[in-house]
């Protein structure tokens, strides 16, 4: 298992030539890319959310577009429309910015619900319909939406159905003092440094190989049960009106496999699930009215769930690795191969 690990390390190092202290975010973006999922980035203005997305896209060799979401933006401004050409007397399809590998929807909560809904079909189905014609989107296709949590005026909260379509919600924090000092030093020496300085370090062949490797990662039954227990605990929590969906369970399993792969393992360990549970679940929880009045947060609910649900204790890494080898042997035998 080398392709996903090498891909992540290469992209991380290249993005790190511009950005400081974003290794974990780059890891999670890589996990989302290898899991065919979309990402919601939340952070106050000026923490490099858009620069992070653009740098990641450039390093990964992916076509990138950015849409500034505003209240007057129309769905056709995202998907595209037919334009009349007077020279030919015919209508010509003009594709919108959605036709890219990485689409950054900047300040997504500033767009109206009607425009936000234009992303739903694209995010879930991988295609869009323009005037009755269904068009496939590029593969890979990732939406990275940014959101400002402190400005509420002129914003429209994302509906639950759309939040559920984001595989991960990541928080971009203000850097600590040491990291901020490194940023000052770096940009004092190279004031023109920006996302355009990031070079492509990954090609389509490497990305395809990494995705194939992720699909082969083994998940033991005990780890699958752990995924189910965590999601079920959010549904049964007294402060939660609606817990994690089936899509949340599937998403948690997929990202755990991707994380295992980029850490060089062919099997998932409970820490893979635990480390990504917050990012997968936090935006999917709908709290009760009493919980909101009591200042209970989705993050605190998830922390409580992670503390209460006991991970598989009998499966050491050696046992999980052995289970993976046994699964490979059984698969080989099923496919007609011989085992000596």
Image (cartoon, rainbow, N blue to C red):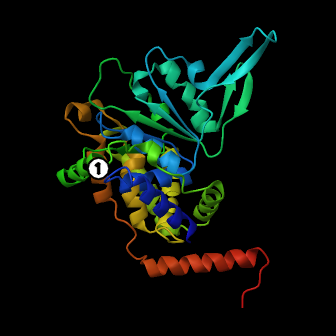
> Does residue 303 sit above or below 49 in this rendering?
below
Name the foreground residue: 54 vs 211: 54
User: For the residue labelled by badge 1, is the local secondary structure a helix, a strand or a loop?
Assistant: helix
x and y percentages locating residue 313 in the rendered image: 37, 73
Q: Is residue 60 visible?
A: yes
* Vertical position of residue 147 compared to residue 304: above or below: above
**Front-most of 224 and 22?**
22
Kindly give the residue lying farthest to the bottom in the view shown: 340
Q: Is residue 261 above or below residue 54?
A: below
Could you say which quadrant of the image residue 145 lies in? top left
Number of marks in the rendered image: 1
Give whichever of 192, 143 is nearer the camera.
Answer: 192
Camera-nearest residue between 164 and 232: 164
Q: Residue at x 76, y 8 (%)?
A: 86
- Classed neighbour count for the residue bearing mark 1: other residues with Cα under 10 Å, few (<14), some (14–19), many (≥20): few
Percent coordinates x, y for residue 139 in the rendering: 65, 45
Residue named by callout 1? 189
Q: Give the quadrant of the C terminus.
A: bottom right
Residue 164 visible in the shown view = no
What residue is at 23 percent from the left and 39 percent from the top? 296
Could you tell whether 100 is left or right of 299 in the image? right
Q: Position of residue 137 (x, y in %)?
A: 66, 37
């Amino acid at each position: 298992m080398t392709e996903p690990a090498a891909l992540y390390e290469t992209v991380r190092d290249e993005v790190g030539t511009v950005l400081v202290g974003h290794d974990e975010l780059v890891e999670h973006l890589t996990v989302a890319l290898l899991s065919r999922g979309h990402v919601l980035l939340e952070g106050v203005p000026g923490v490099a959310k858009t620069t992070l997305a653009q740098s990641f896209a450039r390093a990964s060799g992916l076509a990138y577009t950015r849409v500034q979401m505003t209240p007057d933006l129309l769905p056709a401004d995202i998907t595209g429309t037919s334009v009349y050409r007077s020279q030919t007397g015919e209508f010509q399809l003009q594709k919108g910015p959605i036709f890219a590998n990485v689409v950054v929807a900047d300040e997504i909560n500033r767009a109206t619900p009607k425009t936000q809904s234009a992303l739903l079909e694209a995010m879930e189905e991988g295609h869009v319909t323009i005037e009755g014609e269904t068009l496939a989107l590029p593969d890979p296709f990732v939406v990275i939406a940014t959101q400002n949590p402190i400005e509420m005026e002129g914003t429209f909260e994302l509906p639950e159905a759309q939040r559920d379509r984001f595989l991960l919600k990541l928080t971009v924090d203000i850097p600590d003092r040491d990291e901020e000092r490194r940023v000052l030093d770096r940009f004092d020496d190279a004031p023109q440094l920006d996302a355009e300085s990031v070079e492509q370090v990954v090609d389509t062949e490497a990305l395809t190989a990494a995705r194939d490797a992720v699909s082969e990662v083994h998940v033991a039954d005990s780890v699958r049960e752990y995924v189910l227990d965590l999601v079920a605990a959010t549904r049964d929590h007294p402060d939660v009106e609606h817990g994690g969906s089936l899509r949340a369970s599937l998403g948690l399993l997929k990202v755990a496999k991707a994380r295992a792969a980029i850490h060089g393992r062919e099997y998932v360990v409970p820490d893979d699930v635990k480390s990504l549970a917050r990012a997968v679940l936090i935006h999917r929880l709908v709290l009760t009215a009493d919980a909101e009045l009591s200042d209970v947060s989705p993050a605190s609910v998830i922390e409580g769930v992670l503390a209460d649900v006991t991970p598989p204790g009998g499966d050491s890494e050696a046992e999980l690795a052995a289970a993976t080898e046994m699964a490979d042997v059984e698969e080989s035998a099923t496919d007609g191969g011989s085992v000596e």
